[in-house]
Amino acid sequence: MAKILVVTSGKGGVGKTTSSAAIGTGLALRGNKTVIIDFDVGLRNLDLVMNCERRVVYDFVNVINEEATLNQALIKDKRTEGLYILPASQTRDKDALTAEGVQRVLNELSESFDYIVCDSPAGIERGALMAMYFADEAIVVTNPEVSSVRDSDRILGILQSKTLRVESGLEPVKEHLLLTRYSPNRVQKGEMLSVEDVQDILSLPLLGVIPESKAVLKASNQGVPVILDTESEAGQAYADAVDRFLGKDVPFRFMQPEKKGFFKRMFGGKE
Amino acid sequence: MSDINTPTSQPTSSKHKKPANNHSNNNQLNTDSACFQLKGSMLMLTIMELYHYSHGHFNEQMAVLTKQAPNFFKQTPIIICLEKLAASAEIDFIELTQVCQDYGLFPIAIRGGSEEQQLNALIAGLPKLPAQKQKPPKDESHKNASEQNQTDISEAKETAEAGGDNANQPEKDAIIDTSRPCKIIDRAVRSGQQIYAADADLIIMGPVSQGAEVIADGHIHIYAAARGRIMAGAKGNMSARVFCQSLEPELLSIAGHYKISEDIQGQHWGKAAHARLVDRQLKIEKL
């Protein structure tokens, strides 16, 4: 039986797809057979981040409508062993996601995979609801700014009420907070909410803090999950988050403002 | 028996309460059409344990007792316990009731006794209550007491169906909660969520986020930060109060008298505080 994991946020542009790609890759790198499903029907993105856009033949909606089998639609990642992508349809809309169809696909995937990562679209409409409905665990991606935090709070409320686990009286969905685009320097200047501020509002266990990094944009544009960039702070922070997700006790890094040395002060660091 | 009020506002299945119909899913449902509603309740009652009875002796002892504790004998309902009485003893319950009433005690039921005694009591208007379980014999103080009857205070169950055939009910059914129901939420209330405690107090053990709404007809206690819309006394209870560990609400209202976030900024913002109505003015004080 696979564990179903939803990566969600409410707000758009906070890093759901980046995080789904990184965490899915991280899980596969640690020997778990993993599939990442793009639930953003109509605004397909995951294939770009995973650099498999040229290999999409059939998609998630085709499988739901039984126009294709899962094996036809699943794309095997070329870099990471045991990682598969189920892309979204670009020509359809979210109404194509029926509860029965999604459940059937998830059940089928469940038989052969260890982890199913559902990359949720933004918003709280059908796509997002379908992505979270069957989840066992949820990673709530939040940026350290007030509107993102409030949207995450809203999503957490929905996770508590509109999931299969709740409706069937099982233990509620296990929630994790993933703080992305974190800039300790800006926090120190008071321009950004701190980890403590966000946790105070959301009161949620912290899975990881991903520092704001140029490596993320670069990786997305190149179609490489940022976790594979082991040189970058963001890549290392995602690796830590995956380890924590798998139960390892890893200390948090990249949360203190960097002390600027002589050269940095002379030639200026990134702001 | 199902006349136990659960701590939440969930209605219990309550066939006994509403013999008029069989709806058991909603207590509120028939309050408009129904003339009355029967409810179970746990009451403290005085029990008069009768050892033997003769009019003169009984009257005499009542007179002595009344002198000792005159305040006690003012419209006090009592239950007459026949368990210690000889089964053959014939008692004129109408007379006994009259004597009791003369002294301010009002027998409302009997407990124990033989079938004949129970029948006589019923004719006199005293229904029987289920007999008490046999307790292990205490020390001999009871027997040594020179009094013929002795009043002792114990918990007695007064059920809606007193007089019905419930003599075989186990005694543990007598645990009936009369406290007001109270809704307890032991998690965070998130943005967009709404919690309403109908006719009850509301206790929330996690933070109430901005954009969340918590409403109660009674008091509201929040054992964390209160950042959303907090409305106590929603049906107009002016004595309702709000307690919280950190006061940062978007809106705070008691019985319709409200303050918005802007009005609350100041010494109590972000602090443990409590709010109530004083002369129809919402007053916030340090907790």
Image (tube, rainbow, N blue to C red):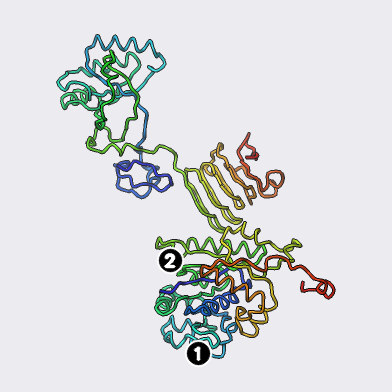
Q: Classify residue B273 as left or right of residue A137.
A: right
Which amino acid type is marked by label 2?
A: Leu
Circle 2 Cα neighbour tier, 10 Å, few/some/many (<14 / 14–19 / ≥20): some
Using the image, determine if residue A231 lies above or below residue A204: below
Are the two marked residues, 2 and 1, in contact with CB atoms closer than 8 angstroms?
Answer: no
Q: Position of residue A53 (x, y in %)?
A: 57, 87
Q: Position of residue B185 (x, y in %)?
A: 49, 51
At 51% from the left and 79% from the top, the residue drawn is A28
| Nearer-N-terminus badge (2/1) | 1
Q: Quadrant of residue B16?
A: top left
Q: Position of residue A239 (x, y in %)?
A: 59, 74
Quadrant the C terminus of chain B occupies? top right
Q: Which residue is mark 2?
A: A164
At 22% from the left and 12% from the top, the residue drawn is B54
Q: Which residue is mark 1?
A: A57
Q: Classify residue A192 as left or right of residue A202.
A: right
Q: Subunit of mark 2?
A: A
Q: Quadrant of residue A190?
A: bottom right
User: Is residue B35 among what the camera can see?
Assistant: no
Mark 1: which secondary structure? Answer: loop
Which amino acid type is marked by label 1?
A: Val
Using the image, determine if residue B173 lies above or below residue B89: below
